Image (tube, helix red, strand yellow):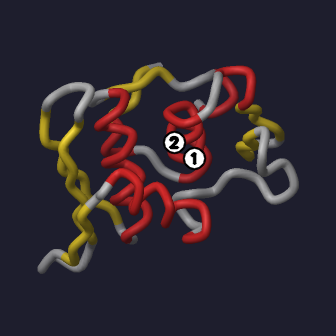
Amino acid sequence: MKVKTTELTRAALNWAVAKCIYEPDDVVICDGRVFAYDDATNGFNPSTDWEQGGPIIEREKLCITASVEGDWTAFCVSDEMDMQWICRGPTPLIAAMRCYVASKMGDEIELPEELK
């Protein structure tokens, strides 16, 4: 099933971020949680954990701002696709991780069966 990157949440969003960073065999889904090869104990949660999501924001130079509607907006320019991406979310990390995934994978991604 294809899902819009602007609608990704929870484990699906964390999985998509992991797919942008790690080799395919280094990302595992277990009991609805995402694990990456270098963070097997607590899971890979960049959409809720600043220690994991913060370095991605800094490295990718994502810009985050509060919107007047009460949510958050993130934007970046993708080198790979030569496009500007803008995504919103209820938290700064969700907005930023959606933007990161969109910049690397496009508007829609195919989710694995375990996350549908």
Residue sitting at x 36%, y 68%: 90
Relative to residue 53, is residue 29 depicted above or below? Answer: above
Residue sitting at x 24%, y 52%: 87
Residue 26 left/right relative to 31: left
Relative to residue 94, is residue 65 depicted above or below? Answer: below
Q: According to the image, label 1 marks what residue?
A: 14
Q: Which mark is residue 17?
A: 2
Quarter residue 112 falls in: top right
Quarter residue 84 falls in: top left
Q: CA distance from mark 2 to mark 1?
A: 5 Å
Residue 77 left/right relative to 40: left
Q: Amino acid at mark 2?
A: Val
Residue sitting at x 73%, y 41%: 36
Relative to residue 19, is residue 63 depicted above or below? Answer: below
Residue 50 picture location, percent across and down: 55, 71
Residue sitting at x 27%, y 30%: 107
Residue 56 picture location, percent across and down: 46, 55
